[in-house]
Image (spheres, rainbow, N blue to C red):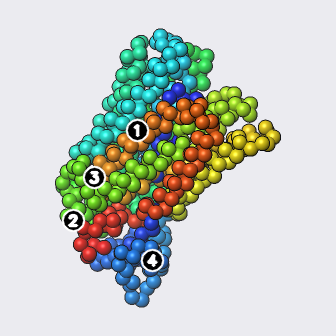
C-alpha cells in the first residue's frame, strides 16, 4: 500500500510504506453468455457446472498444476469472453475502497505534518536544540505503528474490517487532539504514540479490506488507490504547513486538522460493507450474499459462496488462527515472502534517498524544502498513477521486478554523477534526474505491489496475522535504515551507500522473479488453492 513520502528533511526515520511472482496458470471458468439485463456492466450467468480450466499458455510455468483443455474451444477465447464488457465493474466497490483509503490519506498527512513545524514545536515546548528529543517526537510514531501492526491481525479476525476501522479511529482522533493541545513534551509524545498505533493498524487493515471487497478483475487498480491517497495526504500536509513559517503556533492547527479525516473515516465506515469473506467465515451467509450481489453482481453470488465454503472446509478458515501457524506450511512460505519483500523494500534505501534528496536539490540552487518536496511528491504521484493503470494489465510480478530494476539503474546513475569527473552542472542535473527516477520507479511497483501482493498470497485463515507480521518487519527495518543512514554516509560517503542501495534493488528484483507468484485476474480462493497442497485434487 503504499506511497513514498515526499519529505526532504526528516529529523529521524520517516515511516515509508507503499503503499508490493513465478507465473501460475490462470484458472478459467467456462461460462455461457447472454445479453446484460441489469447493472452498470454486462454480467455472466452462473454456470450450471463449475469446472476449472487451465490456460495452455501458462502450461510450462508451473508443471505441478494439472491442465485440462476444454473440447471445441480454446482457453484464449474463453479468457476473452470472460474479460469483455466489464469496463465499469469497479464502480460498485469504488465508494467503499475510497472510504478505506481515507486511512492512507491520514497516514500521508502524519508523515508530512512534522516536517516543518518540529522546530516551532521544540521552541514552544522547551526542548529546542535537543536533537535527541526532537528525534524522539518523530520516531515514537514508529514505535506506536509497530504495536498497531502486530495487534491488527487478531482484531480483524474477531471484529472484521469495518468495525476494526471504526475502533482504530479512536487513537487516531485522540492522538491528533492530544498533540494539538500539548503543553509539555510528555503530552506531544503521548499524542504521537497514539497516532502511530492507529496508523500501524491501518497499514495492515487497508490492503486486507481492499483485496477482499474488490472484484477480481480490478483488485490491483483499486488497491493502488491507497498509495495515491498517501501521496495526497503528504501533499496536503506540505501545503497546510506553509503558514508555519510565519506563525509559530500554526502547528497546533495542523494537528487539530488531522482529527477531521478520522471522523470522516468513522462515519463513512458506518455505511461501508464488511468483507464478504469474513461474513461467510463468521456464519453470516445471507449478509455475505448481499454484499457480493451489490458489489460483484448477482451472477457471482453462488460461485463466490461455493469458493468461500470450499476454502473454509479444506483450509480451516472457519476457525480462529494461531500465530504459530505462520511456522507451518503453506503459511510459512507466504510469511517468509511478505517479510522478505519488506526487508528488501526498506534496505533498497527509500528513506535514505528521501533524506539526502534535500541536499541534492540544494546543490542545484533549490533551497526551499517545500519546493523540493513538491518535486518529490509529483514524481511519487505520477508513479502511482502509472501503477493504477498498469497493475491489472501487466500484473504484480512484472511491475515489481521492473520497479526494482529501475531503482537500481537510478541509484547507479546518481553514483556515476557524483563520482565521475564531469562538469559540475551536469553532475547536479544527473543527480536530480536519478533521484526523481528512483522515486518514480519506486511508486510504480516496489511501493504499491508489496502491500497488495501479500494479502493476495495469504490464506483466508491467516491473512490478518501474516499481514501483521509483514508490516511489523517493515516498521523495524524502517527505523533501522533511518537510524544508521547518516552514520553510514559520514563514515563511507554517499557513493558507496547508494551503490549498496542499487545492489539491494537488484537482489530484490531477483527475489521477486523467483519467489513471488502472479495473482492478476485470479480470485483469492483460486490463489489459495493453487498454493496449498493440502487441498483435494478436485479443487485444483
Name the side, left or right, on which 417 lies relative to 71. Answer: right
- Tell me which numbered mark, 1 or 3, is placed earlier along the sequence: 3
Mark 3 vs 4, N-terminal side: 4
Front of the two marks 3 and 2: 3
Residue 476: give its label: 1
Query: Which of the image's four quarters has the C terminus?
Result: bottom left
- Tag 3 residue: 326
> Marks 1/3: CA distance?
19 Å
- The secondary element bearing badge 2 is classed as helix
User: Which numbered marker is on residue 60?
Assistant: 4
* Point 75% across, 41% down: residue: 427
How far is disc 2 from disc 1 in space, using C-alphas?
A: 35 Å
Query: In front: 66, or 348?
Result: 348
The residues bearing labels 3 and 2 have C-alpha atoms spaced at a distance of 17 Å
Dividing the picture into quadrants, the one containing residue 349 is top right
Residue 532 position within the rendered picture, expressed as x and y whole percent measured from the top left:
29, 65
Please state which of residues 323 and 202 is positioned toward the viewer in this rendering: 323
Mark 4 nearby-residue class (10 Å; few <14, some 14–19, many ≥20):
few
Residue under pointer 2:
314
Q: Residues within 10 Å of mark 3 (few under 14, many from 20)?
A: some
Q: CA distance from mark 3 to mark 4?
A: 30 Å
Q: Earlier in the sequence, mark 3 or mark 2?
A: 2
Tags 2 and 1 in contact by the CB under 8 Å rule?
A: no
One can see residue 360 in this view: yes
Q: Residue furthest bottom?
A: 72
Amino acid at each position: 500500500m503504499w506511497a513514498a513520502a515526499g519529505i526532504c528533511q526528516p529529523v529521524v526515520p520517516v515511516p515509508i510504506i507503499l503503499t508490493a511472482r513465478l507465473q501460475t496458470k490462470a484458472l478459467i471458468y467456462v461460462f455461457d453468455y447472454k445479453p446484460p439485463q441489469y447493472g452498470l456492466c454486462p454480467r455472466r450467468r452462473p454456470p450450471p457446472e463449475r469446472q476449472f480450466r487451465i490456460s495452455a499458455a501458462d502450461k510450462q510455468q508451473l508443471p505441478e498444476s494439472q491442465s485440462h483443455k476444454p473440447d471445441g474451444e480454446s482457453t484464449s477465447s474463453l479468457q476473452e469472453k470472460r474479460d469483455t464488457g466489464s469496463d465499469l465493474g469497479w464502480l460498485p466497490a469504488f465508494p467503499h475502497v475510497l472510504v478505506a483509503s481515507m486511512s492512507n490519506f491520514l497516514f500521508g498527512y502524519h508523515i508530512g505534518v512534522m516536517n516543518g513545524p518540529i522546530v516551532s514545536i521544540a521552541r514552544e515546548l522547551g526542548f529546542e536544540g535537543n536533537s535527541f528529543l526532537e528525534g524522539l517526537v518523530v520516531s515514537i510514531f514508529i514505535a506506536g505503528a509497530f504495536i498497531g501492526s502486530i495487534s491488527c491481525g487478531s482484531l480483524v479476525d474477531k471484529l472484521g474490517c469495518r468495525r476494526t476501522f471504526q475502533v482504530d479511529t479512536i487513537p487516531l482522533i485522540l492522538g491528533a487532539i492530544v498533540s494539538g493541545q500539548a503543553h509539555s513534551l510528555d503530552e506531544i509524545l503521548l499524542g504521537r504514540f497514539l497516532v502511530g498505533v492507529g496508523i500501524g493498524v491501518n497499514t495492515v487493515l487497508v490492503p486486507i479490506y481492499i483485496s477482499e471487497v474488490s472484484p477480481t478483475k480490478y483488485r490491483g487498480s483499486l488497491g493502488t488507490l491507497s498509495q495515491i491517497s498517501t501521496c495526497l495526504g503528504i501533499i496536503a500536509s506540505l501545503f497546510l504547513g506553509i503558514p508555519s513559517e510565519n506563525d509559530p503556533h500554526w502547528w497546533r492547527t495542523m494537528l487539530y486538522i488531522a482529527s477531521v479525516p478520522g471522523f470522516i473515516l468513522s462515519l463513512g465506515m458506518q455505511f461501508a460493507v464488511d468483507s464478504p469473506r469474513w461474513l461467510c467465515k463468521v456464519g453470516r451467509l445471507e449478509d455475505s450474499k448481499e454484499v457480493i450481489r451489490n458489489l460483484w453482481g448477482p451472477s457471482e453470488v453462488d460461485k463466490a459462496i461455493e469458493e468461500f465454503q470450499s476454502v473454509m472446509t479444506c483450509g480451516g478458515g472457519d476457525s480462529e488462527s494461531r500465530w504459530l501457524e505462520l511456522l507451518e506450511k503453506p503459511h510459512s512460505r507466504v510469511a517468509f515472502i511478505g517479510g522478505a519483500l519488506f526487508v528488501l523494500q526498506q534496505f533498497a534505501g527509500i528513506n535514505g534517498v528521501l533524506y539526502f534528496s534535500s541536499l541534492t536539490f540544494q546543490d542545484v540552487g533549490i533551497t526551499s524544502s517545500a519546493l523540493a518536496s513538491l518535486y518529490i511528491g509529483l514524481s511519487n504521484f505520477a508513479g502511482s498513477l502509472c501503477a493504477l493503470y498498469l497493475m491489472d494489465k501487466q500484473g504484480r510480478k512484472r511491475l515489481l521486478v521492473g520497479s526494482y530494476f529501475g531503482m537500481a539503474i537510478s541509484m547507479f546513475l546518481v553514483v556515476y554523477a557524483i563520482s565521475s569527473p564531469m562538469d559540475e552542472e551536469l553532475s547536479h542535473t544527473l543527480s536530480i534526474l536519478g533521484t526523481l527516477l528512483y522515486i518514480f520507479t519506486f511508486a510504480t511497483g516496489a511501493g504499491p505491489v508489496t502491500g497488495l501482493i501479500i494479502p493476495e498470497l495469504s490464506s483466508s485463515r491467516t491473512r490478518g496475522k501474516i499481514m501483521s507480521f509483514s508490516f511489523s518487519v517493515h516498521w523495524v527495518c524502517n527505523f533501522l535504515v533511518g537510524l544508521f543512514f547518516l552514520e553510514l554516509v559520514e563514515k563511507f560517503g554517499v557513493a558507496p551507500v547508494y551503490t549498496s542501495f542499487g545492489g539491494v534493488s537488484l537482489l530484490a528484483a531477483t527475489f521477486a522473479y523467483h519467489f513471488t507468484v502472479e495473482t492478476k485476474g485470479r480470485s483469492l480462493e483460486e490463489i489459495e488453492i493453487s498454493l496449498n497442497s493440502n487441498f483435494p485434487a478436485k479443487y485444483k
